[in-house]
Image (cartoon, helix red, strand yellow):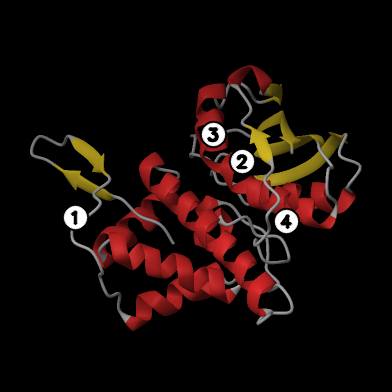
Amino acid sequence: MIIFASFVYAGGAASVIAQKSKTKNFSYSLETQLFFMDDCARGANEYICRCVLNKLQQNYSETTYLKLDADLRKNIDHSDFVSFLSDAAEKCDSEYADGRRGNRLNNRYAEGGSGGIGDGLAGFLGGGGGGIATKAKGSIKTPSMRDVEFVSGGEYRSAADIMKVVRQRTPGLRHIFNKSLKEKPGFQGKVTLKFTIASNGEIISISIVSSTTGFGEFDREIKSAVSRWTFSKVKEGNTTVMIPFDFSE
């Protein structure tokens, strides 16, 4: 889950406002907490989910949080909030890793699915079976507009429209990379994906064109995560593109 407020002013002008409250320590309703935990648990273990939830409640009101979540699911960019979530996830990730070493209270990572920001917090945390706690710190180069190669349907959808989503969603793949680095330290490489975006914004087909990672399981998790991305709607036509994702430790 994720949020930002959209206010419509007189005259029809609308602006999206990321409003972080100065008041600390909000308390979310049980319904919101359960929804958050259920969504988050698809991509991270319970400790990390509760940790991130606590940090959210310390900084954002429930109303603001829910609006931000709804916006991000619609691919409305809120970089400040995404940055806050990323920092919170990294801190909770580190705390969990330190706790495992010090207390050995947990013996395994939770299992989860793959996702993207549009799938809620679980997608933002990376998805892909396993918790995100790891000291490995990989990086991913966000593709540029020049990296977008149109295979077909370029008349229906612009590179700028595609890149808006790619820029927002790519950071969410970093947690999959970090988790995989724990399993196979030192690996890196480029994964090039080919996918078709329907007029409703959904990806209707996707395949791995090439990979230099030498890690098939990782490639498939990246493919699965990207397959759940959602783009803006257009009037007609399918668009097929190829985009490379470059991972390095």
At which x and y percent is residue 41?
Answer: 58, 72
Q: Nearer the viewer, mark 4 or mark 2?
A: 4
- In the picture of the structure, the residue carrying the numbered disc 2 is 198
- Which residue occupies the foreground of this view, 107 or 115? 107
Answer yes or no: is residue 120 visible. Answer: no
Residue 150: quarter of image:
top right
The reply to whether discs 3 and 1 touch (Cβ–Cβ < 8 Å) is no
Task: Give the secondary structure at mark 3.
Answer: helix
SS assignment at label 4: helix
Which dot, 4 or 3, sits closer to the camera?
Answer: 4
**10 Å neighbourhood of mark 3: few (<14), some, or many (≥20)?**
some
Q: Amino acid at mark 2?
A: Ala
- Residue kind at label 4, given as amino acid type: Lys
Q: Which numbered disc, 2 or 1, marks the residue closer to the eye?
A: 1
Percent coordinates x, y for residue 151 in the rendering: 74, 24
Q: Which residue is mark 4?
A: 179
Residue nearest the viewer, comparing 205 with 15: 15
Residue at the far top in the pictured view: 146
Mark 1, secondary structure of its residue: loop
Q: Classify mark 2: helix, strand or loop.
A: loop
Q: Which residue in the structure is indicated by mark 1?
A: 22
Front of the two marks 3 and 1: 1
Of label 4 and label 2, which has the lower sequence position? Answer: 4
Q: Residue 84: horizontal and vertical position, in percent? A: 41, 50
Kindly give the residue lying farthest to the right in the view shown. 214
**How far is the residue under mark 3 from the one under mark 1?**
29 Å
Q: Quadrant of residue 156?
A: top right
The residue tagged 3 is 167
Q: CA distance from mark 3 to mark 2?
A: 19 Å
